[in-house]
Amino acid sequence: MLQSLLNAFETTLKDLSALLLLPALMGLLIHLVETASYNIQSRTFGRWFTIISTGWLGVPVHEFGHMFFCVPFMHRIDEVQLFSVSGSQKTLGFVKHSYNPKNPVAVLGNLFIGFGPLLLGSAIIWLCFKLVVPDLLHLLLQDASFTDAMFWTVSLPGIASGIDLSSGWTWLCLYVVFCTASHMGPSVSDIKSGLSGAAALFLLVFALNLAAMAPRLGSLKNAGLLLYHAGRIISMLMLPATTAAIAGFLLSWLAATVFSLLTEKEIPMPWR
C-alpha cells in the first residue's frame, strides 16, 4: 500500500510538472518584467501617466480574467471595480467573489480565477499577433521542436519577420498587446488565492493516479497524457505574451533611458 502511495505521489508530481511548470515559470517572468516596467515608467514619466497610458485597457482585461472563471467554478461575484485611479484606492481594480469552501469544484476554481488574467491576457495577445501575423503558429514552430520554441529560438525572429510596421492596424494591435502585457501578471493576492486551488488540483490528480492502479481503472492513466498536452497548449498560448512582456520592458527601459539623458536625470534601474 505504501509503495502504491509513493508511486501515485511521484506520478502526480510528474503530471503537474508537465501541466504547470512552464506556465508557472512564464507567469513569474511576466510578473517580474511587468513590475520592472512599472517602476521604470513611474519614476521617469510619473505614476499617473504610467497608469493611464496602459491601465485604462490592461486593468479591465486583468479583472475580466478573474470574472471569466468565477462563473464555471461556481463563485459568486460580489463586487467589481474594473478600473479606478482614485487616490483612496490601493489597487487599480478588483473582483470580490465568494464561494462554498466545502465545494471541491469551487476550491479548485481558485487556481483558475487567481491566474485567469494570465490566461485571458495571453489569449488576447495571441489573437492580436494572429491578426498581425496570420502565420504565427507556423512561424513559432518552423524548423524547431516545441522545446526550442519555448526558449525563443524561433518566436522572436519568427514574429518580428511577419510584422508589417507600415500598417496602422499593426500599431493598434501592438498597442493593445502592450496594454495587456503591462497588467496581466498575477498580483501577490492572486498567487495566494491560486495556491488553494493548486492544492485541490494536486489532490484530484493524486486520487486519479491512485485509482489508475486498479486493474479495472487502468484507463485513468491517460489523464497524465491529457495534462501533458494541456500544459503544452497553455505554454504555447503564453509564449507570445511572455515575449511581448519582455519586449515591453526593454522598450520602456530604452525610452526611459533616452528621456533621462535628454533631461539630465538619473537613468532609472528596473529593480531599484
Image: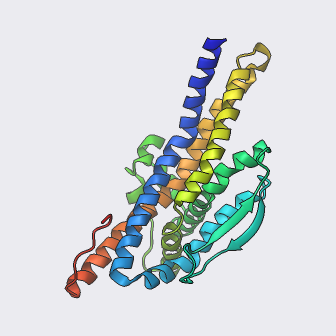
**Is residue 204 in sight in this rendering?**
yes
Observer-nearest residue: 11 or 195? 195
**Is residue 143 in sight in this rendering?**
no
| Residue 263 left/right relative to 66 | left
| Color theme of the render | rainbow
Quarter of the figure with the N terminus: top right
Quarter of the figure with the C terminus: bottom left
Observer-nearest residue: 72 or 146? 72
Q: Quadrant of residue 131?
A: bottom right
Observer-nearest residue: 234 or 91? 91
The location of residue 71, given as percent across then percent down, is 78, 58
**Picture layout, residue 222 above or below residue 75:** above
**In the current view of this chain or complex, which residue is farthest to the front?**
88
The location of residue 188, given as percent across then percent down, is 52, 58
**Picture layout, residue 115 above or below residue 165:** above
Q: How many marks?
A: 0
Residue at point 27%, 83% (across, down): 259
Residue at point 59%, 18% (across, down): 6
Observer-nearest residue: 65 or 170? 65
Q: Quadrant of residue 237?
A: bottom right
The location of residue 125, given as percent across then percent down, is 55, 65
Residue at point 79%, 50% (across, down): 100
Residue at point 70%, 34% (across, down): 204
The location of residue 250, given as percent across then percent down, is 34, 67
